[in-house]
Amino acid sequence: MNFKHITVAGSGVLGSQIAFQTAYKGFNVSVYDINDEALEQAKGRFINLKKRYQEDVSATEEEVNNAYNRISLYSDLAKATADADLVIEAVPEVVEIKTDFYKKLASVAPEKTVFATNSSTLLPSQFADATGRPKKFLALHFANEIWKNNTAEIMKHPGTDPEVFDKVIEFAKAIGMVALPLHKEQPGYILNSLLVPLLDAAQLLLLKEIADAETIDKTWMVGTGAPLGPFAILDVVGIKTAYNITEAKAKATGNQDYEKLAQLLKTEYIDKGKLGRETGEGFYKYPNPSFASADFLT
């Protein structure tokens, strides 16, 4: 079971990063998204990633061009997965969307294909039946800015074949990740079990008007020595993702604070096109956010 051809389903912020990193490490990558407009946006992300790899990891122009040329784009799921050894799903963090996607994927992907979800907060066992191949299904979770924050959390569900688990660990290492095996299901894995409570706490402080985003970030950065505060991290994650997670929590718990926070993120940020670092503005303005200035921590 050697993975040679990889399909990434979903070409958003993290999906495009997974695809580019995989291609950068020499794999052929098919990228699937729902329409040509989404794929055009993905091309723009790949072009930006070429620059980031040259700046951040000293990649040569030849290396990033080769990576770009190993990526093929498809709006037809059957064509995107025709040769796939592994499909990494990075579609929106909404249970219904993921479930529908897996049912479609199961009907077109070859029998050999292993499925992996990059979900940040949802468990693979929630979708195992929909995949039609629970033994060949597990979670493979990456952090944002994958080329620098190179964690890969590999999490099995009770029905995952141990051989599949081991092969996905090998694949993660092959694309330059630090492979982090999780032997039991845990919502949020390791990274987000630590990170999400921090981001939640920061957003609720903002919602309750305890302090502004800059002051909250400054407090965290000065108090812990962290390079980024929670709102700077949210700008990297993307405010749409934060909104989807918050809205899901509001529905699941009925907590009015989460309902109000979801509404705040929608009206004050998403509706105004402030989606985070990718769009040039979120909680901060880019490319020169205030938290990066020399006097921010004084």
Image (spheres, rainbow, N blue to C red):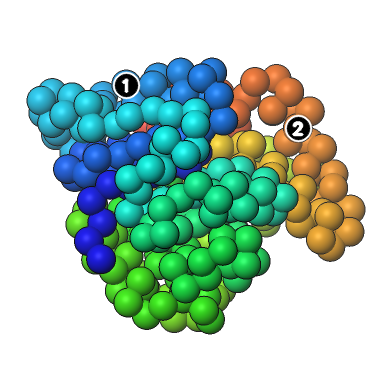
Gap between marks 1 and 2 measured at Cα: 28 Å
Dot 1 lies on which element? helix
Nearer-the-camera pick, 159 or 192: 159
- In the picture, the disc for residue 116 is none
Quadrant of the rendered image containing residue 261: top right
Q: Amino acid at mark 2?
A: Lys
Callout 1 environment at 10 Å: few (<14), some (14 to 19), or many (20+)?
Answer: some
- Seen at 89% across and 53% down, the residue is 256
- Seen at 89% across and 59% down, the residue is 254
Nearer-the-camera pick, 209 or 183: 183
Q: Amino acid at mark 1?
A: Ile
* Callout 1 touching callout 2 (CB < 8 Å): no
Quadrant of the rendered image containing residue 181: bottom left
Q: Is residue 188 left or right of residue 266?
A: left
Q: Is residue 28 visible?
A: yes
- Image height check: is 277 above or below 7? above
Q: Position of residue 157 (x, y in %)?
A: 52, 75
Q: Is residue 285 visible?
A: no
Q: Position of residue 296 (x, y in %)?
A: 46, 35
Q: Is residue 34 left or right of residue 28?
A: right
Dot 2 lies on which element? helix
Q: Is residue 169 left or right of residue 225?
A: left
Quadrant assignment for the N terminus: bottom left
| Foreground tag (1 vs 2) | 1
- In the picture, the disc for residue 47 is 1
- Image height check: is 192 above or below 36? below
Q: Position of residue 99 (x, y in %)?
A: 66, 53
- Seen at 59% across and 47% down, the residue is 104
Nearer-the-camera pick, 235 or 285: 235
Lower sequence index among marks 1 and 2: 1
Q: Position of residue 113 (x, y in %)?
A: 39, 57
The residue indicated by pointer 2 is 266
